[in-house]
Image (spheres, rainbow, N blue to C red):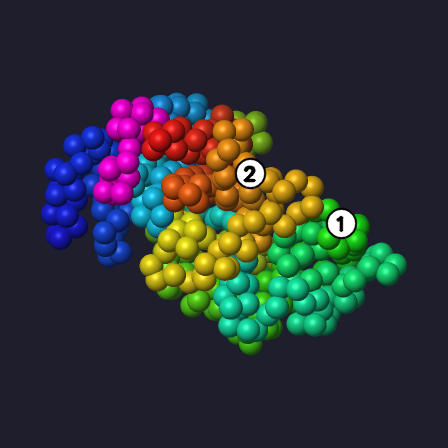
Amino acid sequence: MRWRTELRNRRGMLRWANASSGRLSTLTTAYTFAALLAPFFVASPAIAQGVNADAWNAAISRFEQKMEAQVAADDVGGVSAAVASGSDVVWARAFGWADRDRRIPAGVGSIYRTGSISKTVTAVAMMRAVERGFIDLDQPLSEIFPATARFPGAMAGAPAPTVRQFASHTSGLVREPDWDIAASGPIGIWQERVVESIPLSRFQNAPGAEYSYSNIGYGTLGLAVARAVGRPFMEFVEEDVFKPLGMTSSTFVIGPELAPRLTVGYVNRGDGNPDPEQPTREHAGRGYKVPNGGVYSTVGDLARFMGALQGRASPAILSDESVAEMSRVHTPEDPDNGYGLGVMIRTTDGGARLIGHSGSVAGYNAYMLFEPESGLGVVLLRNYNQGQASLGAAGQELLVELLGALR
């Protein structure tokens, strides 16, 4: 196959690459099923030319050893991890089990739920609508979706929250509706659940006053985007975000083609009995949590997505202006650390600016983080909720170490 020849050529050129981790090239999107289940390493020339090979390999080796030990100690499920340069995966490996009961190992092509990384996807869809003139970031969301005027508890004299404020968690809304079935029910009724949740949610402060993470806010935003563009939300995302980026393993509904690669999610509460029942049930739907928690993906697809967030994807789906707008802090507390439009932003003590998002739903955790100046990023996906393997800590530590190897 052609990808084997290309990969051998790259290995010959890049002698520092540790090729023992696998056999899959990112130079083709026509991956075989067997390759998708294998761990792999690919080095890109851009990384190779500017890297301290010893420091890079040492960072990767430390991460592998630590993650392998932690996943084995947790003895629940698995973790898939990748390092990306722009939209290209330059290293990836999987640890543990995609299905512990059937002893199916996790692979680099394993599919996981991404939780709140879905909010970043929704924000990108929103910016696609902004660029086409369907939405203005500073218009009240109620102009697009009049039912949102019914959120109770608005502060006297406060203006209606804008699209920008919904996207940056500064709308003033509470985190969740006061309704115990809002986040349950089949995916086909998610829009009805959003509308029904509006009068059962409330403002807790004035729009723009502070950062206040809101799942109902993002559920409402996603439905507003769909109404603005005149297309079903999931269709719009799949056709205008996933498809142009080549995110062929990303979706809201797992069909028969992707089902063999879907990991089994496990809720583990420390009692030694991982439970797949709730995660399995939620594959049919989580009520209103579609724009704010409904995306399934892989580490490779999320690498492509991170590239789009940096303006490094080909084809580009966001203008430079949109990339910049999403990537600046929109929350009032700290100009260097906060929330942008669908992304979390942090400045390290060393001055590196890191952008990304995390996600957590029953049986699954997700984490993506990138440094836009270098284009380097990491993605970690896990099919269990608790354990020694902390995705956020491990991912940030790896990224910072790899950035050090580039300097």
Mark closer to the chain start, 2 or 1: 1
Quadrant containing the C terminus is: top left
Mark 2 and 1 residues: CB-CB less than 8 Å, in contact?
no
Residue drawn at x 69%, y 41% is: 333
Disc tally is: 2
Q: Which of 96 and 152 is in front in this view?
A: 152
Q: Eyeballing the image, is 336 above or below 32?
A: above
* Residue 396 visible (yes or no): yes
Drawn side of residue 143 relative to residue 59, left or right: right
The picture quadrant where one finds residue 179 is bottom right
Q: Which residue does the image show at 51% across and 68% down from the upper left? A: 131
* Horizontal and vertical percent position of residue 273: 52, 31
- Depth check, front residue: 359 or 225: 225
Identity, as a three-letter code, of the amino acid under mark 1 = Ala
Determine whether the residue tagged by mark 2 lies in a helix, strand or loop. strand
- Element assignment for label 1: loop
Residue 209 shown in magenta? no
Label 2 to label 1, Cα distance in Å? 20 Å
Position of residue 26 measured from the top left corner of the image (x, y, whole percent): 26, 49
Residue 67: horizontal and vertical position, in percent? 40, 28
Is 42 or 150 nearer to us in this picture?
A: 42
Q: Badge 1 is on which residue?
A: 209
Q: Is the magenta stretch mostly helix, strand or loop?
A: helix
- The answer to whether 214 appears left or right of 47 in the picture is right
User: Which residue bears the numbered disc 2?
Assistant: 346
**Residue 98, above or below 269:** below
Question: What span is in magenta?
Answer: 42-59
Assess whether residue 57 is covered by the magenta stretch: yes
Q: Mark 2: which amino acid?
A: Arg
The residue positioned 44% from the left and 41% from the top of the image is 371
Residue most toward the right? 156
- Residue at figure coordinates x 28%, y 39% from the top left: 47
